[in-house]
Amino acid sequence: MKILVFSTLFPNNTAPAHGVFIKNRMKAVSEMDGHEVRVVAPVPYFPPIKRFKAWYRFSQVAARERVDGLTVYHPRYLVTPKVGMTAYGVCLFLGALKTVKALEKSFSFDVIDAHYMYPDAFAAVLLGKALNKPVTVSARGSDIHQFSNLAMIRPLLRYTLTQADAVISVCASLKEMMVELGIPSYKVSVIPNGIDGTAFYPADRAEARQRLGIPLDARVILSVGSLIRLKGHHLLVEAFGRIVAEEPDHTCLYIVGDGVERGALHRQVEALGLGSRVVLCGQVPHGTLVDYYNAADLFFLGSEREGWPNVISESLACGTPVVATRVNGIPEIVRSDDLGVLVARDVPSFVAGIRRALDTRWDRSAIGAYGQSRSWAMVAQNVVSVLKRVSMR
């Protein structure tokens, strides 16, 4: 079977970790006998003007490249920042059409496999209709959570879901949300993400801390994710301040990631007098995350909403217990008290959950074994079964 992957969420030469979970899934598919994969990962058109730093990087993305053995094409599409979101799907379709038509001739793909519901999957459905190709679409989490509540986008989301030949959801809670939008339950297959056991695995904690410069005698709380409001880092910092005030010890908080809230978090840390205990690490190379997970006593995620958060899977694969909010797909990952603590999304609950986790003697070997149990190869088998079904329509 020849598969054309379509998504703006895919690694490129300027953002090697962008959409790495999609790359991992489709690389595993490509490694199965009898399947070939090509990727179309459009990027916004922007002229090479360096003073517009956030957009300049798009001009530096190669038109075609190899990413971890996969051939990836990056056609350009027109985007007006902060204006005209309802037109993004059509713009994406038009920008990618020439490239996809050329691949239809040279690669003769059997199915389009799209990721992220809008604008990506919407555009993929239009491409499928234009070329008479079946289309599968994968929901990731924020796409359904965000766009199902936007009056102008909700009809486009429903169109995508109804017109696609099959829908894949990373968790059961996300499937329920799509069924509430009017999609038949039988049309949606739940296929959770996997883990790359060569990238995330249990390792010696002392050695990991030495590599990162973390004190060996510290109790370390780790959080990894974009610094945006819905991830709850501001609530975590407040909760951490209360823990430190009541139980002064060697507990430290490391926050890995970057985003619009970084400045506000820095000011909050300083205002609470936590500058010596909270480290805002910024963005770190993807390959060093394994050291952070192994160095930590516990991992924390305080999101308002999630699909299947890969950071939790990564932490568990390293044997590190989790404290996380009881929302959406998270209880489907942290399925027992042996893996971590689930909490409500408020500061007192964060404090109680962190204290409980720090006071628990965790079986990190058992946590690691559970975290390693779902490989991307297993995910690929599930995905291929869906793709085969729609390709024989």
Image: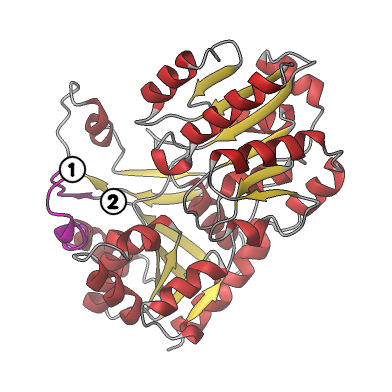
Front-lying residue, 259 or 52? 259
**From where the camera sits, is residue 6 visible?**
no
Query: Over which residues does the magenta segment extend?
Result: 76-94
Mark 2 surroundings within 10 Å by alpha-carbon count, few (fewer than 14), some (14 through 19), many (20 or more): many
Left or right: 194 in relation to 265: right
Q: Secondary structure at mark 1?
A: loop
Q: Quadrant of residue 194?
A: bottom right
Residue at image mark 1: 45
In the picture of the structure, the residue carrying the numbered disc 2 is: 42
Could you tell whether 258 is left or right of 385 in the image? left
Amino acid type, mark 1: Tyr
- Outermost residue, bottom side: 393
**Residue visible at 73% across and 19% down in the picture:** 209
Could you tell me which secondary element the residue under label 2 belongs to?
A: loop
- Residue 137 at what x, y percent from top left? 40, 69
Image position of 155 (left or right of 68): left
In the picture, residue 182 is in which quadrant? bottom left
- Is residue 40 in view? yes
Q: Is residue 5 left or right of residue 61?
A: right
Q: Which mark is residue 354?
A: none
Q: What colour scheme was applied to this rendering of the protein? A: secondary structure
Q: CA distance from mark 2 to mark 1?
A: 9 Å
Q: Is residue 284 above or below residue 142?
A: above
